[in-house]
Amino acid sequence: MNQHPNMHLVDVSCSACGASFRVRSTAEAISIDVCSNCHPLYTGRERTVASGGRVERFNRRSALATV
Ligand SMILES: [Zn+2]
């Protein structure tokens, strides 16, 4: 069973960190801005910033509601 007859290995290059790897895809070539190497979600570098802002906003709103 071959669900995707056009699937083949393509080189994916990350423009942010320069990492390259291969995936199976129907595309000829893939260029991405972030990859698992440099994405904040994986590196954890900006995780506190991303989630902190949302929580902070929620806390501020709930604080206003109690006053
Ligand atoms: Zn990357």
Image (spheres, grey):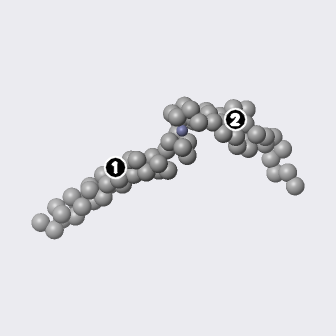
The residue depicted at 35 percent of the width and 53 percent of the height is: 48
Above or below for 39 versus 30:
below
Q: Is residue 55 visible?
A: yes
Q: Nearer the N terminus, badge 1 or badge 2?
A: 2
For the N terminus, give its image quadrant: bottom right
Q: Label 1, label 2: how many angstroms apart (C-alpha)?
A: 32 Å
Q: Nearer the viewer, residue 39 or 55?
A: 39
Give the image quadrant in which the ligand numbered 1 is located: top right
Determine whether the residue tagged by mark 1 lies in a helix, strand or loop.
Answer: helix
The x and y percentages for residue 59 are 24, 61
The residue depicted at 26 percent of the width and 56 percent of the height is: 56
- Mark number displayed over residue 2: none
| Amino acid type, label 1 | Val
Position of 30 with respect to 41 (left or right) is right
Position of 29 with respect to 4 (left or right) is left
Figure label count: 2
For the C terminus, give its image quadrant: bottom left
The residue depicted at 76 percent of the width and 40 percent of the height is: 9
The x and y percentages for residue 29 are 69, 32
Res 63 quadrant in image: bottom left
| Amino acid type, label 2 | Asp
Single out the residue that lies furthest toward the bottom. 66
Determine which residue is flagged by label 1.
49
The x and y percentages for residue 12 are 65, 36
Q: Is residue 27 visible?
A: no
Above or below for 62 versus 9:
below
The residue depicted at 56 percent of the width and 32 percent of the height is: 18
- Mark number displayed over residue 11: 2
